[in-house]
Amino acid sequence: MATPGRLRPFPLGYLGLDAASLTEALADKLVHDIGKDGTHATDRDWLHAVIRAVRDRLIERALETERAYAAAGVRRVYYLSMEYLLGRALGNALLNLDFEEETRAALAAYGRELEALEGLEEDAALGNGGLGRLAACILDSMATLRLPGYGYGIRYEYGLFRQRIENGEQVEYPESWLRYGNPWEFPRPERLYPVHFGGRVESYRDAAGRLRFRWVDTEEVIAMAYDLPVPGWRTNTVNTLRLWGAKASRELDLRAFNAGEYVRAVERKIESEKLTAVLYPDDTTERGRELRLRQEHFFVSATVQDILARFRQEHGDDLARLPDKVSIQLNDTHPALAIVELLRLLLDEHGLDWDTAWDLTRRTCSYTNHTLMPEALERWPVALMERLLPRHLQLIYEINRRFLEEVNHRHPGDVTRLRALSLIDEEGGRSVRMAHLAFVGSHRVNGVARLHTRLMRETLFRGFHELWPERIVNVTNGVTPRRWLHHANRPLASLISSRIGHGWVGALEQLARLEPAAEEAAFREAFRAAKRACKARLADLVRERLGIAIDPDSLYDVQVKRIHEYKRQLLNVLHVVTLYNRLRADPHYEPAPRTVILAGKAAPGYRVAKLIIRLIHDVAAVVNADPAMRGRLRVVFVPNYDVTTAEDIIPAADLSEQISTAGTEASGTGCMKLGLNGALLIGTLDGANIEIREAVGEGNVFTFGLDADAAAALRANGYHPRARYEAEPELKLALDMIRGGHFSPGEPDRYAALVESLLARDRYLVLADYTDYVACQQRVAEAWRDPDGWSRRAVLTVARMGRFSSDRTVRDYAERVWGVRPVPHE
Ligand code: 26Q
């Protein structure tokens, strides 16, 4: 065993990717970065030492990457997202560097085990769900494709809350992911930008006599950069994710004349640093909150200043070249104020005229939409904007005035149209429609799945699409195969590589070469063994964490995602209750032993979603305690769904539940991760399900329910959920049991209002799709009884998932939106 306490000069090759160099480096990191010796170091100290050693190897490549981009003078892509669901980084970095074996060996020399250390890394959860995880997958793919791409975001001190289940209910706890420090990050205390709020706008005449504006008497907060390395898969490219933290302005350092003033001054400093304290834990409707608007402006202002600084350093003051050198991608409307901030800087700081500034802004920005649901569209009260960002509001009015003039020119006197397209919603307290702002300020606007893009053109952005038919394009989402197959599912990844080689990790289309293997009994057998290993692992985890025994030979029926009415976890529960009733009614009924696995967080303020979690637990308690089930049915809810838990659950899934009301799920990406891991899809014709079905073949997925057009038609022509209830005895029984307290005997009317609202309105057509869903689940059970037929379809599913790599997604963006190309370097 080597002794880490000994000092010695750094040998050449100190940063080498071999076990000997790393062994040296670990001792150095442990002593000099962590300040411990081998006898006192904890596992976490060793983890941080490993991360620091890996970080050293990444930062050299990151600096080299940046030099290569600068030397090439190419256009950069800036991905602006308020959320990044990164998860753990060590395992991913080691795989990308092809450095895992060496690391395991080096640690072994100190008597430590890599996997044990990996399990201690914090899961970076700076996001809510699909949108945040998509941002993380896109960063991975930009680096892998050697594209000059930068991520920008916020360094929240508290990411998404930790979910605990207490007496069957979700309880939220703050998660301080930085409590041991973040060993990956490079703080940049010199990369500082002032960000302003409040104040008022003054006009003046410049030297040339032109009318100009000045934003004065503002409060100031400082944005400080923290950089994280983003390594590509087996390339030397390492890109950067830059996260901003809030720091108090020196302007608050006023002279204090007494102790009270001094303490108040420090309090004000602390107050301003709270800006980046917490991520808003809502994936739809949290709105109107002043702090959230402050976060959005803080984020985009610092980012746009940084982008302009890099541009000017490289290309000087010729801002006319901005769109040739800069592409800004807005991840939903959350960073849409970047449009206004860029325009403001071009006008007020750089003295450009309106037409030039606006043209440059629009050619630089593009916007990704992730939802069509009206209540999820961001709108900010005009009064709040006026108080916080008066100059920005002025500019929004001017953008709107010119835009509506254009609309009026094309459709003279069409007041209804003007009202519908305006950036300002005049109904019920005026507000700014951020989606309209993002649309008019972008040269490209994209949807995230084909159906979603079509619906954007036909519904939400219909009028905009008529004005600018070229602007809306589709870029179907994807997921990174590095994390979601290669890293998360070693057994399957090894099996695939043994058959078709390793190239699929960086070129997922190659999975197609697996197709012939679906017809080979030996391969199907090996596939089942790999799946069985993942299922046994999950069973261990469920037993340890929840004390529930699940059978790895049962069908793992998995629905993992945020809890939301439109995602219809309730439909899943209704199927469970129906199955339960059938099994109780007939002890000889043996459809398929099934383990229904659910996981997901509810927004803390979303009462119905939290009630759904409670219902899942109440139903699970009754089902799991009933001896009559005899292993034929189990229900488990895995708490605190995050990226790490997803990596545990997804590889073990047999069946992937994607059952949203058609027309509501923009894309979904869980469907892709699950398909890639060989789960068969049961789903509606919604979001990306449609494209997955097309890719894997109708015969290999289980489709049910109304399609988007039929769902819209049903609503338009009068939908009567109560009639469905009366007409369908099993549905009636299930709902009566839930409503009557069968699953909540201690509080019989716990779900009365929930059931009543389904009977009265059923906004998401749960009852309308119930019968078809239950019938479809019966086809699933029948298919499961033929293990060979099932695994044939599962292998084909994997083989046909190549299109759903985020590498393809990023290539689509590069081509259709950004106009950038790879920058190779050594
Ligand atoms: C908005 C304002 C204030 C506070 C929070 C928010 C907020 C935060 C997060 C609004 C929405 C989100 C997240 C949305 C999201 O995750 N959408 C999902 O994006 C995926 C990637 O495109 C799609 O696959 C999913 O269909 C979509 O639901």
Image (cartoon, helix red, strand yellow):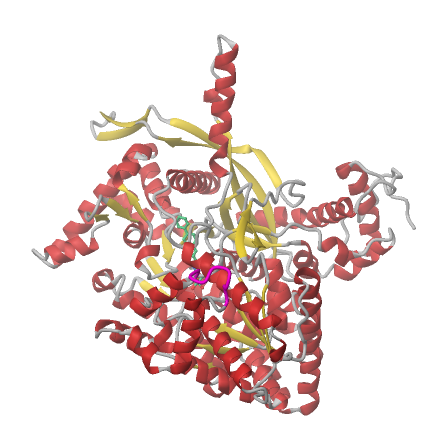
At which x and y percent is residue 559?
52, 69
Q: Main secondary structure of the magenta part?
A: loop
Q: Residue at x 71, y 48 (%)?
A: 51
Q: In the rendered image, is residue 701 in sight?
A: no
Percent coordinates x, y for residue 137 in the rendering: 54, 60
- Outermost residue toward the top in this view: 257
Q: Is residue 748 left or right of residue 137?
A: left
Q: How many marks?
A: 0
Quarter of the image where the C terminus is located:
bottom right
Left/right placement of residue 272 relative to residue 650 reads: left
Please, which residue is most extreme toward the right here? 1
Residue beneath the point at 22% across and 73% down: 718
From where the camera sits, is residue 812 visible?
A: yes
Q: Quadrant of ligand 1?
A: bottom left
Residue toward you, 755 or 109? 755
Residue at screen point 43% across, 38% down:
298
Is 746 colored magenta in this rendering? Answer: yes
Q: Which residues are magenta?
A: 743-750
Residue 83 coordinates in the image, percent (x, y): 48, 50
- The x and y percentages for residue 696 are 50, 82
Looking at the image, residue 279 lies above or below residue 630 = above
Q: Nearer the viewer, residue 235 or 373?
A: 373
Examine the rendered structure and indicate whether residue 447 appears above or below residue 405.
below
Residue at 30% across / 67% down in the picture?
761
Task: Name the foreground residue: 646 vs 112.
Answer: 646
Q: Is residue 760 magenta?
A: no
Q: Is residue 379 above or below residue 759?
A: above
Q: Is residue 618 left or right of residue 402?
A: right
